[in-house]
Each structure stands twice: as C-alpha cells, then as structure tokens.
Image (spheres, helix red, strand yellow):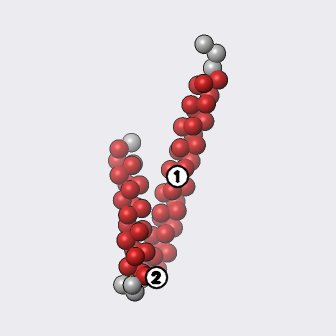
Amino acid sequence: MKDMALDFADTLARGDHIAKESMIGDADPHALVQALAQTELVVETAVAVRNKVVEAYQEILRMPV
C-alpha cells in the first residue's frame, strides 16, 4: 500500500513537472500528453479504490450487531 501511494505521488509530480516544462517550451508536446494521460489514469484508479473503501465501510456500518 505504501509503494502504491509513493507511485501515485511520483506520477502526479512527474506530470506537474512536465506540464511546467511545456509552459516554458522545454518539453515535447507528446511527452506532455503522455504524462497527462498517465496522471488521469492514476487519479481515476485512486478514486475507484477510495470509493470501494467507503462502500465497504458503509456496508460494515449497516451490519447488525
């Protein structure tokens, strides 16, 4: 889980870095599109995992004691 969080943060930082480089003209537009697509995929995956955790928590709360 820790590695996954570090990979998530690394992907976001890499996308941010490439976006900043493209603003000043130092990055290849293809690299920017690729980094943004990868960032989008990572964020969508993180949101899906979060939704599953919330759903499981709510299911536990509904269990009779």
Look at the image and tell me in which quarter the C terminus lies.
Answer: top right
Residue closest to the far bottom: 25
Residue 52 position by quadrant: top right
Q: On the rendered structure, is 48 left or right of 14?
A: right
Q: Residue at x 42, y 81 (%)?
A: 22
Q: Secondary structure at mark 1?
A: helix
- Disc sitting over residue 45 in the figure: 1
Image position of 6 with respect to 62: above or below: below
Place of residue 63 in the rendered image (x, y in percent of width and height, measured from the top left): 63, 20
Q: Marks 2 and 1, Cα distance to the nearest angstrom?
A: 24 Å
- Disc sitting over residue 29 in the figure: 2
**Nearer the observer, 57 or 7:** 57
Q: Secondary structure at mark 2?
A: helix
Label 2 crowd (10 A; few <14 / some 14-19 / many >=20):
some
Q: Residue at x 42, y 68 (%)?
A: 15
> Mark 2 vs mark 1: which is more N-terminal?
2
**Nearer the observer, 16 or 29:** 16
Q: Residue at x 46, y 82 (%)?
A: 29
The amino acid type, in three-letter code, at marker 1 is: Thr
The amino acid type, in three-letter code, at marker 2 is: Pro
Place of residue 11 in the rendered image (x, y in percent of width and height, measured from the top left): 40, 61
Place of residue 30 in the rendered image (x, y in percent of width and height, measured from the top left): 46, 80
Q: On the rendered structure, is 32 left or right of 3?
A: right
